[in-house]
Image: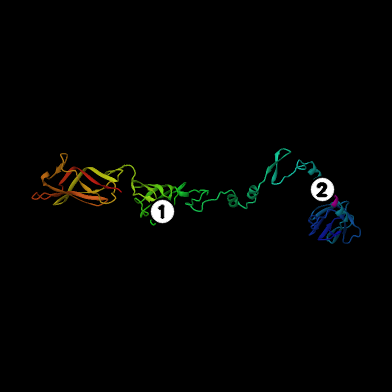
Amino acid sequence: MSQIYSTGKISVSQNNVNFTGSGTGWELAGVTGGICFVQGYASGWPIDVINNDGAGKFALPWPGPNLANANYVIFCETAQSARATAANQRLAELINAIRLSPYASATINKDSLLFGAAAGVLGETPLIAFARSLLAAANGSAARTTLELVKQTSTTDATAGRLMGVGAFGLGTSSLTLSQDVNLDDLPVVTAFYNWGSPAPINAPAGFCEMLYIPRNPGTAIQIAFNSAGNSFIRGRGSGTWEAWRPLGSGRVSNSNGVAIKLQDGTQICLLANVTVSFANTDQLSYNWLFPAAFASSPEFVGLTGVNTGASYIGIHRTSLGHAYAQYNAAQSQLGWVRSYGAPDFVNGNAVQAQRLVAIGRYI
């Protein structure tokens, strides 16, 4: 620092020890004291203390006239000496504190780290290359890489050692949705939950299914599927070849259209009791039956249980009934009787009550 300092302007008041500065920056410049010469007053005056960048205090009241925003010069030689003395004193205090510290006699060995083992007690622990690389990691991603905690790149990433996220392989959230162009024979060899709608993927047993895929190795696995119609399916893979889907267990569906019994071999039997087969036209009595559960294709048999002793005839005699008929597809059937040759025409209100309907086919 120069021996003189004259930046800014000073204002003094007669018989007052306090003075102020404008644009002086005394504290910032390290001015702590000295002899101040103010424009228009011949003698220098001793400074007791500099309070901040714009205020200070003389050692004695200012004897000169009031002066505002006057030029000034502070002879800083005395201030520099005081500052050096203060700095030396502080340095001595720091050295003494270090000398008395429990760390003063510590010996740091190679690849080690000192730590406070207890109050006033130092401990030492190894700081090997791995630990140093972890401390040097720039962010969480870099730290996970160092720890070999690498996250999956996708929900089906099966790389060994990868961290699974929520939704991986359909776990923790919705199952993985497959599109119609996916082949169930060629899924990744990882245990996973899948779903699909309609159109279904290639080699699917039905539409709108949820499926669990459990592979043991690339050539051995099982797939278990369930759909919203209450059907369940299973198939296995051995020596790299998938078998055909087959029903899993048996089931029963019951609603206002009757009962559907699903057998494990894929057979479905639909039944409906207490049916009234009524007038359709002068030659037919019929009933339109929506199956309680759809078949995989048109059933193999649909018919009435026959004119039985429990039947009730409305407006006709049983001899008026000719052969039974049925027209059907996978979802429904129209079935009933045609009029016997020579019998009177059927009229509106003719019916046969308390009939039973049956359909037999496959649900897969």
Q: Nearer the viewer, mark 1 or mark 2?
A: 1
Foreground residue among 9 and 252: 252
Q: Residue at x 78, y 44 (%)?
A: 98
Foreground of the two, 169 or 58 = 169
Which label is found at residue 210?
Answer: none
First of labels 1, 2 by sequence position: 2
Which residue is denoted by mark 2 in the rendering?
91
What's under tag 2, amino acid-wise? Answer: Leu
Residue 96 left/right relative to 114? right
Return the residue found at the far left.
342
Whether the residues at callouts 1 and 2 have beta carbons within 8 Å, the answer is no
Q: Which mark is residue 186?
A: 1
Identify which residue, 96 or 342, lies in the foreground: 96
Q: Quadrant of the N terminus?
A: bottom right
Please, what is the dominant secondary structure of the magenta stretch? helix
Q: What is the span of residues highlighted in magenta in the rendered image?
A: 84-92
Q: Which of 317/337 is in front? A: 337
Figure quadrant of residue 7: bottom right
